[in-house]
Amino acid sequence: MTGPGPCGNSGADFTAAGRRHGGRSDLHPERLGPGLVVILEQTLRQRGAAMAAGRIFIQNDWARALWENEREAWVSCKIPEAATLYGCIKCQGLGKDGIPVITASEGFEVIEVTKKSILISCPDGNAASKFLMPYAVFSRIHTKSITSMDISSGGGLGVSCSTDGTMRVWQANNGELRRELIGHVYDVNTCRLFPSGIVVLSGGMDARLKIWSVEDGNCSVTLSGHKGGILDTAIVERGRNIISSSRDGTARLWDCGMSTCLAVLADCGTPINGCSVGFAENTLNLGSPDHQPSEREIGTEGKLLLLAREDRKLQSIGLLSRKPIFMFEGSDAFNCCTFFSSTYILAGTHDGNIYQLDVRNTKTPIQIIHRSGAPVLSLFPCREGFMASHSDGSCYVIQQDQDYVIEFTGPDCDPIYKVVVREKFAYTCSRDSVVRKYQLLGF
């Protein structure tokens, strides 16, 4: 993560993230362990003061600088209401185990070093961060900014779209191209894989949704009805129904098999930047539908739909009933949202805030996380925590039972539009046209 060096930075305090092509992130609640969200809530509350104290930044190419060239990289710690601390770390050679011996200048301490990470603390700032360098870098998939990406649940395939006008399927282990998906008239804003891992859903500025076969690259279904560009999508269960949100201010429910729109779920009058669907807490009253649902509507019962709106509102709707559940107003436009569990949700705004809310009572947030003043572009549940990215290149994981934040390094202040976690790897895509893959050891 680049910080208050040549590019400056944006804050490290916990107080309260973005307009973009459309953020989104989905959660499969069954992946979370029992009582996880309660533990995480308590942990984050306890660590809030410490994380508010300061945030450590490091030279974005620190690994190259230490191992290959200058053998020195800059670090800094921004402390709210205090002077920023500046320093450096230096490579003193290799230890007996082949791991570099790294020392830090006054005010900083090197706690742990591996071939792919370094853990640094700043006692005066009461801060600690583990910085990860990429496990692999895929720079030949696209030639321009990569605005959306997804990885199959098994981690075998990736799909991404770019402002170079391409949407491509590739091997997640080495970035080797498998298919090019051609058919949208203008830029593709969002793409994701169905749970099967062999079908792709995309939405573009041409206001159309398309469903593609990974095996032969053919588009089998085109869904039309929106009057503005598609900003985000969500898949209901196995994918017989899908949801889309658009610049035209509507969210729609679609039947993939019949290629028809089953319902306009919301008409907000403002762009809906992100959407997410998840199971609702069983004590939450989702309401009853006014009319008998279509027999083509599959898997909507017991589900809650979240809409991240441009007008600073986070809206929730009972997916089956179509009834409003809550409306929460944030500090700026909401860009992305996700379910952390059936009870807790996360949403990011244009001014860098990540709100954690309890769906049973959204009047007051459980907490507001603010590690960067730049727009939050993506949120993704990650084991016992979550991963977030911002438009200033900030990308990190906040996880329970860790006394430090995990920071992903590589992009030099370039926006990171999407983050995805699969098994032991995290993937990011950025304005610099690169997909980065990080190995999550110790999770």
Image (spheres, helix red, strand yellow):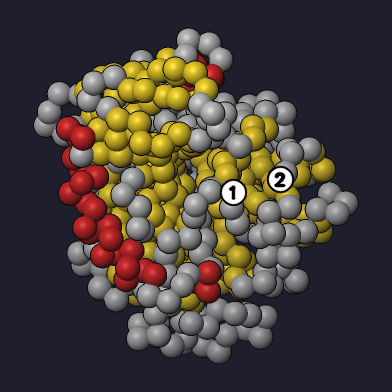
Q: Residues within 10 Å of mark 2 (few under 14, many from 20)?
A: many
Q: Seen in the image, is 401 located left or right of residue 62?
A: left
Q: Write down the quadrant of residue 201 in the picture.
A: bottom right
Q: Residue 57 or 232: which is nearer the viewer?
A: 57
Q: Residue furthest right?
A: 216
Question: Relative to 158, is 283 above or below?
Answer: below
How packed is label 1: few (under 14 Cα within 10 Å), some, or many (20 or more)?
Answer: some
The amino acid type, in three-letter code, at marker 2 is Ala
Residue at (78%, 38%) from the top-left corner?
Answer: 176
Q: Give the x, y percent position of residue 106.
A: 24, 21
Q: Are marks 1 and 2 in contact (CB under 8 Å)?
A: yes
Q: Residue furthest front?
A: 96
At mark 2, the secondary structure is: loop
The answer to whether residue 7 shows anywhere in this view is no
> Which residue is rendered at x = 51% and y = 40% of the image?
417
Task: Return the residue nearer the eye: 116 or 306.
Answer: 116
Three-letter code for the amino acid on which mark 1 is drawn: Phe
Residue 278's x, y, as percent?
49, 71
Q: Residue at 22% x, 59% y: name it.
A: 45
Determine whether the residue tagged by mark 1 lies in a helix, strand or loop. strand
In the image, residue 107 above or below residue 210: above
Residue 249 picture location, percent across and down: 46, 55
In the displayed structure, does residue 42 sit left or right of residue 23? left
Mark-to-mark CA distance, 1 and 2? 10 Å
Q: Which residue does the numbered mark 1 point to in the structure image?
A: 425
- Checking the image for residue 172, the label placed there is 2
Q: Which quadrant of the structure image shows residue 131? A: top left
